[in-house]
Amino acid sequence: MIKLFKKNKPDIQEEWNSKGANYAKEINEMVEFGEKNGWENWKGKEPEDKREHLADEVIHQLKQANLEKNVANFRANFPPSHAPIISFLEKQSQSIEQLHFIDEQKIVFLTGTAYQKRQAYLLNNDQTLELDKNINAIGKSKRNNIFAIATESKISTFKGWEGKLISEFTLNEIAKLGITELIPFNDGNKLLVVTSEGIYLVSQNEEKLIHPLNEENEEDWSPNIDMENATLSNDNTYIVVGDQCYDHRILDSNGNTLGNIGPQSSYPHFCLFSNDDSQLITNSCHFYNGVTIGIDSDKFNGVNIEAYSESEYYKIIDEEMRIYAGLATRNYYILGDAYGNIKAIDKNGNKIWRHFLGSTISGMTISDDQKILWVGSSSGILHKLILSKGHRDKHTIGNGNHYEEFRLLIWKNEPQIWKW
């Protein structure tokens, strides 16, 4: 490390840029070859990013640039990369979750998982504002711009961010549970609440456990689950629920089972409807990989897809990703995986584009015009991407032609949020 600080700034900058550009070029060439010719035919070595020894000084200069309000110049000299700063991420990272678009350049998001003390933030362009420390979860409806805000014993729904109050739900059984995901219905009068102690349909009258179900009436049964996941159709006609040990089930809006979807990999992990509700995709995982299938909406009622079996009721959408977060645009899904990739895939499984960010994707949201994508990761980094604007530098990994306007390092035990 002493040797590093004897280098002058131009030397560090030159090494960072030449090695970074070469690494990105080699990775992009390798991935393109594997996709076109099959990975079994790749005979070359996997490229290595050999810049870790520069990380301390680069991060030091990044922080100094923030303090001096000179980030734009620093960003031009040191394009961001993931691999060299892994040692920082291992110590200071935290999950960026529950991202929701508000309007223009404004979003809301939380740091921390359902098991941790969270902090909510408002991001307006590149300025962050800490919100009420009592906020435990934030959700947004699929349509009609309804926001839900959860505190320790209450969930409130609003028409728009900071808009008119619609309803308040006083929590009882689920008051102490960490909320993995919160989805208000389009009218703000019901909630889908996802926790590791079960998935609930919440109304003014009840907190109805809809997954898992104690169908055998076992005395020692518990709703404790892992990899809990659920979604609502955009028109709120259907609910889908699943977890590590129970298949995905399609429910009606009152929580009654309509169909069953067995995993085509090991464990049910993620679900999402297409933008027009014509298709449901479900993802199941095995370690860092997975399989995603698509089921057309006209097959929902009575469907029973067996695990690990071919069926005319579904089509393969993807056979690589363990999906942690995703959204549906008008033309395709954008899905984020365990390896730090985001990929655009259409309803027929056609790969539109891919973009690499580095750590497991933990949340994302998109502007209403679908031109700006915000992506959070478990590394404690929030990325703002301008889609299809063109690559900003030669360090970009992926073929999506996207421009990263900035990334925020929202790390634990740091005096501020660092912009890069």
Image (tube, grey):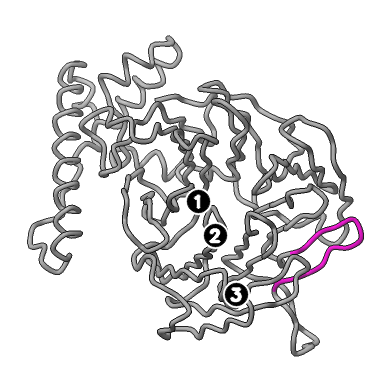
Q: Residue at x 63, y 54 (%)?
A: 234
Which is more toward the observer, 55 or 418?
A: 418
Say which label, 2 or 3, has the lower sequence index. Answer: 2
Q: Which quadrant holds the N terminus? A: top left
- Magenta segment range? 200-211
Element type where label 2 sits in the image: strand
Q: Against 356, is 53 above or below?
A: above
Q: Return the residue at label 2.
A: 272
Q: Earlier in the sequence, mark 1 or mark 3?
A: 3
In the rendering, at what x and y percent does residue 266 appear? 45, 77
Residue 340 makes an appearance in the image: no
**Residue type at numbered disc 3:** Phe
- Mark 1 or mark 3: which is in front? 3
Toward the front, the furthest residue is: 298
Between the residue at mark 1 and the residue at mark 3, the CA separation in whole angstroms equals 19 Å
Which residue position holds label 1?
A: 328
User: Which amino acid, by three-letter code, is at mark 1?
Assistant: Ala
Q: Label for residue 300? A: 3
The amino acid beneath tag 2 is Leu
Q: Please tell me in which quadrant of the rendered image residue 49 appears.
A: top left
Dot 3 alpha-carbon crowd within 10 angstroms: few under 14, some 14 to 19, many 20 or more: many
